[in-house]
Amino acid sequence: MIVVQRAPEPGGAGGFYRAFGETLRGLKTTFGRLVEGPQTYQYPEEKVPVYPRFRGRHRLHRFEDSQLEKCVGCSLCAAACPADCIRVVSAENTPEHRVSAGERYAAVYEINLSRCIFCGYCEVACPFDAITMGHDYEMSDYNRSDLIFTKEMLLAEPLERTPLRTESE
Amino acid sequence: MPRPEVKFVTFSIDGREVEAPEGAMLVDGAKYGDVEIPVFCYEPKLGEPVGACRMCLVEIEGIPRLQTACSTPVRDGMVVHTQTERVKEAQNSVVEFLLVNHPLDCPVCDKGGECPLQDITFGWGRGISRMVEPKRHFKKPLELSPLIAIDRERCILCYRCVRFSQEVSEDYQLVLHERGANSFVGTFDGHPYVAPFSGNIVELCPVGALTSRAYRFRARPWDIEGAGSVCTLCPAQCNVEFTVRDERVLRVLARENAGVDDGWLCDKGRFAYQSIHSEERIVQPLVREGDELRAVSWERALEAAAGALAKAKGKVGAIVGGQTTNEEGFLLQRIMREALDSPHIDARATGAAVPLELQRALAAPGLQATVPDLEFAHTVLVLGTDPIDDAPILDLRIRRGVRRHGVKLAVATSRPSALDPNAKLWLRYAPGAEQAFVAALDAALSGADGFDALAEAADADPKALLALAAMLTADSGSADDGAGGAHGGEDVVIVWGERLGVAALPALLNVAARLGLDGRPGAGLLELPAGTNGRGLREAGVQPNAGPGLAEPTQADGKSAREIAAAAAAGELTTLYLLHSDPLREHADRRLWERALERASTVITHASVMTDAIREHATVVFPAESYAEKEGTVVHPDGRLQRLRPAIGRPGMVRSEWQLLTDIAQRIGHDLGVLTGPMATQQLVAAVPFYAGLTLEEIGGRGVRWQEREAAAAAPAAPAGPFDAGTPAPAPMPNGALRLGTFRSIWASTEVEISPALRFLAARQQLEISPADAERLGLVTGDRVEVGADGTRVSATVTLRGNVPAGTIFLGEATAESSATELLGDQPRLVEVRPA
C-alpha cells in the first residue's frame, strides 16, 4: 500500500502564515550578514584571485640567464593535447641564429585557445618545463582567429597580472 | 638459381605449436605464432644476420645458453621460450647496456615517436639504469653527406648502415672505425658518403643516429599522414609512401613490394619530392602574348589550345613524355586519332617507331621476365643498359641475385657499367653497333657463318662473345627436374634497354628463341624503357603505328617522334602537343627539334617547370600535376599495372590532366565521355584486350601483372621467328677521331635540379674517356674540353675511366647545359675533342 504524504493545502490563514514566516526567516540571515559589508567582486575593475595551481592561459618560458627559449619544438605537447589545439613546426638552430638550447627550436608554436580545454596535459608532457599553465583567464575576443596565440604572445609577460590567492584566503 | 621450395616445420614457442617455414630465423618463425621478439640489428633485406645487438635472446630447450633468435633457424620439434625470467632478465640487461652511451635526448631527436629504441625500451626495458659514469661524446650533429646527418652519440652499433653499404649497395664506403666501446660509423677517410642509394640508411637506422637533412625537424609522427603511391621518376616505378603534413610532401619512404622494389629507394626517388613544392613550379596556365608568356585564366588557355588544334586538323604532332599516365596517354591518342585526324603521336624518346610485329613478339606474355626473376635466374645478361642510370633499383636486385643466389651475371654494354665488378663476364662493343653486336651474339649461339665479321663490325672481342654464348647456353644439369626441362639449359634473363635501338630487335628476338626463353618460367626478356611509363604508353596506343592493345591502327600509320620533328621543321605539321615532354632536352638531334619548334605555329605543352623549350617556343602552357597529385595507372617494365593515388591537393590553379584533355576535346567538338578519373581507366581497360576486366580495386596497392591474369590470352599473337636481322652496319672506325656514345645519368633531370637537397648531384656534362686516348690528347681528369662534330660544340669536363674502350668517349644526355643530344643525329657519330 502506498501512503502519500501531502504538503498542507496552500491558501487560507495557515498558508499565509507559512509563506510569511519563511520569508522572515530568510531575511533574518540577510540582515544578519549586512554588517559584514558587500562580498561582490567588481569585475572587471577587480579580478577574482586564483589559486596558484589554477590552470589558465599557457605561458612559454625562456632561460633567465641566456634568454634562450626553453622550448625545443619537440611536439610532445601537441601529441598529449586531447583537444588537438597545439601546432608546432620546428626548425634547426644555427650558430648565427640560435633560439633554443637544443638542436631544434619551435619556428611556429600556436595554441588555439578557443579549442583548449585547459587540462594541463601539455605542461605534464613537456620535458623541458617550457610550457606552463599561467593564471590568466581573460581570453574573450571579438574574432575566433584572434584566439590563436602565437609563440611571441605566449612568451611575452602578460600585460596585467592575475591576482593570486594568498594562503589564508 | 631456381626459387627454393618452402617446407613447413612444427616447433613450439611459449607452449604453442606453430608451423613455420623451414630455415626461417626464429624471429620470423615466432611471428607465425603471434609472438614478438624484439630486434635491432636484424633486417632480412640486408642478408645474413649478424647477431650484433643481442636484443633477441631466447631460451631454447636443450641448449644451455640463451640464443639469438635472429640467427637461429627454426628446426622441427624445437621448444622455445621467450617469456621466462631468464629471457626477461637478459632483455632488460641488453636494453640497459644499449642505453649506456645513448644520450636519451628524445625530445630533440628526429626519430622520436617512430624510434624502435624508444619502443623496445618501453616494452622490454627495465625502466632504470645503473649507469652513472659519463657517456661518450662526439661532435654533433655532423654531416655524413649533404643528404644525411649523423649523430654518433645516439648510435647503438647495430651495423645496419654498414651492412647496407657493404652488402646491398656495395659501394663499400661506410665502415666501423675503432673497436669495442670506441667504435663509430663513418667513411674510411671522412669523405662525404655520396652514393646513389645512400638515403636508405636513414630508413634502416633503428635509432636517431642517421637522419635525413631534408626531413630533419620537419614533423613528428603524430603530425603526419602516410599516403601510398608510386614514384614515377624512372621506369623502376618503386612503390613509395609519401609523408604528408599540411598538404605538403615532407618525405618519401619505401613501401616494400617484392615484385617491384624490394623495399629500397634510390636517392632521386627519396629526395626529389622537393621538386613538387619548388618555387619554380608552374601553377597556372600561361599563354604567349607577343614575346612573353602571360598567366591567364583556364578559360582563355583552353580556348587558345582548342582553337589552334581545331584549325590544324590533320597537321598536329604529339610527343608524350615518360611520366604520363596510361589514362592521359590514352585520352590524348583518342583526341589525336578521333578528333584531329592526325595519328602522329609518339612516346619513344629514341625517336624511331618499332614495327608492330616486333613489338608483339617482344610483348608475348611468355617471354616476359619479372623483377624477382633477376634474383633467381641462373644467368642474367645486361644488354645495352646500365640499370644504375636507367632503373636504379634493379641494380640492387641484380647485385642481390649475384651475392645471395649465385646468379651468373654477364654485362654487354658499350659504356662501362656499374655492374662490371660483379659480372662473371663483361664485354664492350662500339656505340652505334648494337645491331651488329646482337647479331654476332646470335651467330655465336648458333655457330653460323659470319660470326667473325659481325664481331668485328661490332668492335667486340670475339673470344669474349663466344664465352658469353657458352655461358648463356651452359647446362648445370639442374634444369631436368625443373619446369624448364623441355628446353634444357638454364634460366636466362636478358635485361635490355630501349636505347639498344630498333635495328637490334630482330636479332634479340632470335637470341631469345635460341635460348628457349619463351614460355619458360623464371626466364625471359626485361626491357628497360627510356621513359618511366614507356611500356604502359605503348600498350595504351601512344605510338604512331599501333592503337591501344598493340592493335593494328584504324588509320594509316602516323609519324614517329623523329619524323614529327622533321615534318614540323619542314612546315608539314603546324601544331605540336608536348605532353610532359621537353624534346630539346630528351630527344636526339637538338638542332632539328629547335627548328621544328621554331617553325610550328602553335606549341601546346603540359609542364611543371619552365625550360628553354617552353620559354622560347611554347604558345600555351598548361600546369602539369606532380606525381604526388596524379590519379591514374602506370605499367612497370615487367607488365605490372600500378596505381597512382593523389597524396596531396594540387597547388595554385593546377587541375587534373585527364580532365584538362577532356575539356580540350569538348571544345574541339568531340566528347570523350569521361567525367571522372576512374572512367578514363575503364575506357582504357575496355580498349586494351589483355587488360580486360581489370579494375582499380584489383590493381590495389601492390599492382597486378597483366601476364598473370586470364585476359593475357587476348594478347595479340606473336609472329613466329626467326626474324630477319638485316645486315648490320659496321661501327664507324675512329681513325684518329673518337666514337661518341651517350648515356642518361639518373641525376640528369629537372626534378633533381630544382630539389634543393639534390641540386649538388645534378648531372654536369662529363666526358668519359679511356686513359689511352687521354694520354694521346694530353688530358687529365678535371680538364675542360670541347667536343665537336659538324660545327656543333659541347663543352665538358674530362673524367678518365679505366674500362672505357680506347677510341670511344661518352657524354651525358639531358644535362641542364650542353647536353650530348646536340651532337646526336640519326647516325652514330665521330667527334673530336679539343681543350677548351
Image (cartoon, coloured by chain):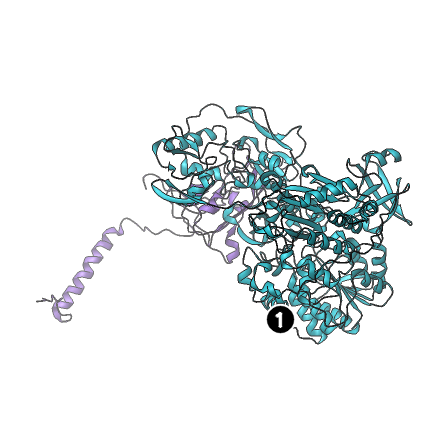
Image: B834 above or below B488: above
Decide which of A96, B200 is in the foreground and name it.
Answer: B200
Q: Position of residue B196 (x, y in %)?
A: 66, 41
Chain of residue at mark 1 = B
Residue A129 visible, this orientation: no
Q: Position of residue B584 (x, y in %)?
A: 80, 55
Image quadrant containing the N terminus of chain B = top right
Q: Residue at x 67, y 57 (%)?
A: B533
Image quadrant containing the C terminus of chain B = top right
Q: Position of residue B212 (x, y in %)?
A: 60, 41
Q: Is residue B443 left or right of residue B674?
A: right
Q: Residue furthest left?
A: A1
* Chain letter corresponding to the colour cyan: B
Residue linked to disc 1: B674
Q: Residue at x 82, y 34 (%)?
A: B771
Q: Which secondary structure lies at badge 1?
A: loop
Residue B137 visible, this orientation: yes
Q: Is residue B366 left or right of residue A33?
A: right
Q: Residue at x 32, y 51 (%)?
A: A38
Identity of the amino acid at label 1? Answer: Val
Decide which of A169, B682 is in the foreground and name it.
Answer: B682
Q: Colour of chain A?
A: purple
